[in-house]
Amino acid sequence: NTMGTALIYDEEMTKYKLLWVDPACKIEVPERLTVSHGALVRNGLTDRCICLPVREAVDAEILLVHSEEYLEAVKQTPHMTLEDLKEFTLQYGDVYFHPNIYHCAKLAVGSALQLVDSVLMGKVKNGMALVRPPGHHSMRSAANGFCVFNNVAIAAQYAKQKYGVKRILIVDWDIHHGQGVQYCFEDDPSVLYFSWHRYEHQKFWPNLKDSDYDIVGKGEGAGFNINVPWNKVGMENSDYLSVFCHLLLPIAYEFCPDLVLVCAGFDSAIGDPEGEMCATPDIFAHLTYLLMNLAEGKLCAVLEGGYNLTSLAQSVCQTVQTLLGDPLPPLTNLTGPCRSTLESLQCVRAAHRQHWSCLRHAGTASLRLFPKFGIIINQNILSFYFQRNDFLKDADDGAVTALSRVFSLIDKMKNNEVENQILPFFKYFFDEKNKQTIMRSSYFFRSVMAWRWLVMPP
């Protein structure tokens, strides 16, 4: 990581809290930032990052996403009495206001913009902003779900406007659907929004039909909104990885973003009272790494949710360590995606098939195998590599040539002659000729099918 990793944090954003009793809001506490930053300090990660100052966003920046009426209304909150604040809060869903929240919300947006500036100006390679309040639920004219201004949506519009960025990928791995981001970009083909979220067939907050898999975007933006509903709790690392590898990554490589923004909510980690999922904090190292191969590594992660202070702090550390270029923790107990995940995956792929060529032949096995290489090489699981003679024994000349190229790239990776590159694999397997040729080695095909946890069912 030659250019370094930015970290943006300011204690000022801890200086607001819930001032009355509200069971829905009591989990959004200042300690969320304190423990996250504290863990980075304790693990020596802040010293290795380039720590950037925060700034307040100005009105024109906030208005890239929000309405003037809404901004003017929020501007009144610092002067309100407790009763006024309570009353003001009631018009919105699951959110609270405080005399200092408008100031903090401007800092949260400004932090995201500072991060985008430093990445797009080439001052840093990537970075993370630890912010409160979060942003992805807030809409054009409404606060919602602890969110006042939509930090990441504003950052995306800002990158387009100020730097002329043509294509932006927003990956929302928070456990809630970022409906505010979806509504902002649903008709915009220059922004690809991906969200997975606890849904349980619309029984989980925010209980929107708009969060289901069949909402793919509107007009020009059709195909550029990807919703992956989790219809059961208890999802594990394998479920998260299979969605990345069978859905997000193929589409992301086809989309070819110039910038990746992450709505980095960690309520999708084990122990969170909101998510009730079972993925471990180290999965975020792998998810981050898989996204770092896009957009020449230009990645900006902005904190969203995360309410179990222990898993939140660990997940933040895993993310920042990976951004810094540290080796990935080994993932153990990868069992295979559960039935519910496979159902969701198949529904989303079917809904998007007409929009993305990487999903067109999803019925055939050829498209099921290429993501596995990324994970294998990424984790240095080289069982594929060590069985090279078996793969080659029943292949014809074309398949031998194609496979030999794959082996030679793995050799180079093994000897550290090239960086861990997943991209050449994706490019390689998108090439129809190579795909068909490699498929002609039936032993190769059978072996790939045997790696069940990352393989779609027939």
Image (cartoon, rainbow, N blue to C red):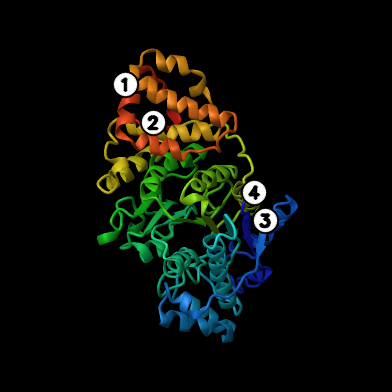
Q: Who comes first in sequence, dot 2 or dot 4?
A: 4
| Position of residue 409 measured from the top left corner of the image (x, y, whole percent) | 49, 30
Residue under pointer 1: 440
| Position of residue 44 measured from the top left corner of the image (x, y, whole percent) | 73, 51
**For residue 308, side relative to residue 148 (left or right):** right
User: Is mark 1 in CB contact (under 8 Å) with mark 2?
Assistant: no
Instruction: Identify the residue shown where x is 62% and y is 55%.
Output: 5
Instruction: Identify the residue shown where x is 64% and y is 50%.
Output: 317
The kind of residue tagged 1 is: Arg
The label shown at residue 314 is: 4
Secondary structure beneath disc 1?
loop
Compared to residue 105, the image places residue 5 above or below, namely: above
The answer to which image quadrant residue 286 occupies is top right
User: Is mark 1 in CB contact (under 8 Å) with mark 3?
Assistant: no
Q: Who comes first in sequence, dot 4 or dot 1?
A: 4
Q: Who comes first in sequence, dot 1 or dot 2?
A: 2
Q: Who comes first in sequence, dot 4 or dot 3?
A: 3
Secondary structure beneath disc 3?
loop
Residue under pointer 2: 369
Q: Is residue 38 visible?
A: yes
Q: CA distance from mark 2 to mark 4?
A: 32 Å
Mark 1 is surrounded, within 10 Å at the Cα level, by few (under 14), some (14 to 19) or many (20 or more) other residues, namely some
The label shown at residue 49 is: 3
Mark 4 is surrounded, within 10 Å at the Cα level, by few (under 14), some (14 to 19) or many (20 or more) other residues, namely many
The kind of residue tagged 4 is: Gln
Q: How many marks?
A: 4
User: Is mark 2 in CB contact (under 8 Å) with mark 3?
Assistant: no
Q: Who comes first in sequence, dot 2 or dot 3?
A: 3
